[in-house]
Amino acid sequence: MAFIDERDEEVARLVAGERIFHIPLVLLPADAQEGQWLRLSATLVAESSGGQEDRDWRRRLGRSDPGGPIKL
């Protein structure tokens, strides 16, 4: 569970336990408002059927990745 602590035009600040996350609003339900709770979940999906185009895209992303922890 995460609490919607604050939101602006593009980003919401979620609080989950002792951690704070900044999430683009496009990833939240359209009617999500400050002061509400979210139940978070994730689902793994099979590889895209995009074929070579997807593999090329992932390769380009990998080359531009500086490494290290992800900052949200």
Image: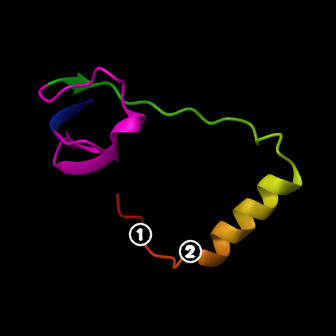
User: Residue 71 location in percent, x, y?
Assistant: 36, 64
Label pair 2/1, CB-CB below 8 angstroms: no
Tell me where residue 15 sits by quadrant.
top left
| Residue at image mark 1 | 69
- Give me the disc on residue 65: 2
Q: Secondary structure at mark 1?
A: loop
Q: Is residue 72 left or right of residue 44?
A: left
Q: How many marks overall?
A: 2
Name the spot of residue 16 as percent of width and height, x first.
Answer: 22, 40
Could you tell me how far apart the alpha carbons at marks 2 and 1 are, in whole angstroms? 11 Å
State which region is magenta: 7-35
- Residue 3 is situated, as x and y percent measured from the top left of the image, at 18, 32
SS under mark 2: loop
Q: Amino acid at mark 1?
A: Pro
Outermost residue, right side: 52
Quadrant of the drawing holding the N terminus: top left
- Quadrant, the C terminus: bottom left
- Residue at image location 65% in from the left, 71% down from the top: 62
Snapshot quadrant of residue 49: top right
> Which residue is at 44% across, 30% downward?
41
